[in-house]
Image (cartoon, rainbow, N blue to C red):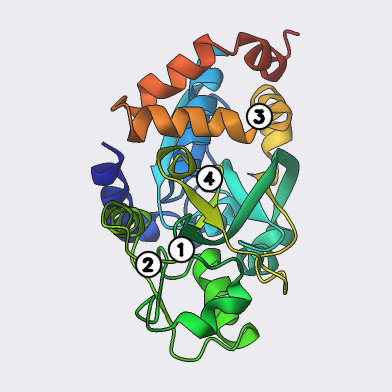
């Protein structure tokens, strides 16, 4: 299940951090090394693209690391690519720090979003209304891993929206979803940070709070980033990565298969590919 996998990812990020440094040589042309951050979106895109690259004849290695290490790894060349860079807001600090040391190939997904979310039975419509309901929410905004862009923006929101009495509770995506599940089952008040695409919107009747100050930005995009030199070293793989583009519904399908139907990441990716050969053929340059 994804619960165990993501917990392992967080731990492995600490163990692998030392391995993704400038001391590593760039991967060979026959092997493509994909960085995988600790979220379901990174898993979904990573495993799908892994299968497509392997279909094209490449050996694919996946490195499961924390988000900061992913950007550092692409910048120093120890990772070939990362497929889950949220721009312009969520991963702003990593793009500012490392963005001039790797290539942004373009957006692989539009129509994404990040924000604060509540169950539909909670009679609150806007983040601006939260100061009136500190007690009902127990002064907690349940979020994900510390150091993530989502947490950074949410903590900034405490000042932007004058959320005195609130704290942003960090932990993990898994922990946040467990809190949300428990609250919904008992019809309790809860506000969490979430994003689109995510299977949670299919599982539960939940809704975004309005964000009049655009704390989380007007709209997010997911970009593919690649190390400098990849196009020259491996033009075939580079072309696949450059053509990789899909829709939020595609990613949600893969995530739902894993988290709610119990498929492995590999099985969910293979299932999606089998049912979407038209898109895959475009990525492969066969269309």
Q: In the image, is residue 2 above or below residue 174?
A: above
| Cα–Cα span, label 1 and label 2 | 6 Å
Q: CA distance from mark 1 to mark 4?
A: 43 Å
The earlier-in-sequence mark between 3 and 1 is: 1
Q: Residue at x 49, y 43 (%)?
A: 201
Q: Position of residue 159 (x, y in %)?
A: 60, 88
Label 3 SS: loop
Closer to the N terminus: mark 3 or mark 2? 2
- Quickly name the residue at label 2: 189
Question: Residue 265 location, x and y as percent?
Answer: 37, 29
Q: Tell me the quadrant of the picture where the N terminus can be found.
A: top left
* Residue in view at x 46 percent, y 46 percent: 205
Question: Can you tell which of label 3 and label 2 is closer to the viewer?
Answer: 2
Q: Are marks 4 and 2 in contact (CB under 8 Å)?
A: no
How many other residues sit within 10 Å of disc 4, few (<14), some (14-19) or many (≥20)? many
Q: Between disc 4 and disc 2, whose residue precedes? A: 4
Q: How many residues crowd mark 1 within 10 Å: few (<14), some (14–19), many (20+)?
A: some
285 left or right, relative to 85 = right
Q: Quadrant of the C terminus?
A: top right
What residue would you read off at disc 3? Answer: 246
35 vs 159, nearest the viewer = 159
Q: Position of residue 278 (x, y in %)?
A: 67, 10
Q: Secondary structure at mark 4?
A: loop
| Cβ–Cβ under 8 Å for marks 1 and 2 | yes
Query: Does dot 1 land on a helix, a strand or a loop?
Result: loop
Frontmost of labels 3 and 4 is 3
Q: Earlier in the sequence, mark 1 or mark 2?
A: 1
* Inter-mark Cα distance, 3 to 1: 33 Å
Q: Which residue is mark 4?
A: 79
Nearer to us: label 4 or label 2: 2
């Amino acid at each position: 299940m994804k619960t165990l996998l993501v917990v392992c990812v967080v731990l492995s990020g600490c163990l692998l951090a030392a391995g993704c440094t400038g001391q590593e040589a760039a991967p060979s042309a026959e092997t493509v090394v994909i960085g995988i951050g600790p979220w379901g979106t990174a898993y979904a895109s990573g495993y799908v693209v892994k299968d497509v690259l392997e279909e094209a004849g490449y050996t694919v290695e996946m490195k499961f690391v924390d988000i900061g290490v992913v950007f550092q790894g692409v910048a120093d060349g120890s990772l070939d690519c990362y497929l889950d860079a949220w721009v312009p807001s969520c991963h702003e600090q990593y793009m500012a720090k490392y963005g001039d040391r790797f290539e942004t190939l373009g957006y692989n997904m539009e129509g994404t979003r990040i924000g604060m979310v509540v169950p539909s039975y909670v009679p609150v419509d806007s983040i601006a209304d939260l100061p009136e309901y500190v007690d009902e929410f127990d002064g907690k905004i349940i979020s994900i891993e510390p150091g993530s862009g989502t947490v950074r923006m949410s903590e900034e929101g405490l000042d932007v929206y004058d959320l005195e009495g609130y704290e942003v509770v960090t932990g993990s995506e898994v922990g946040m979803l467990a809190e949300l599940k428990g609250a919904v089952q008992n019809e309790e008040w809860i506000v969490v940070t979430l994003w689109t695409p995510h299977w949670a919107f299919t599982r539960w009747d939940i809704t975004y709070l309005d964000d009049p100050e655009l704390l989380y930005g007007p709209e997010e995009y997911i970009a593919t980033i690649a190390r400098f030199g990849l196009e020259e070293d491996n033009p075939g793989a580079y072309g696949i990565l450059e053509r990789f583009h899909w829709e939020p519904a595609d990613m949600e399908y893969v995530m739902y298969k894993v988290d709610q139907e119990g498929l492995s990441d590999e099985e969910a990716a293979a299932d999606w590919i089998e049912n979407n050969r038209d898109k895959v053929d475009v990525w492969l340059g066969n269309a």
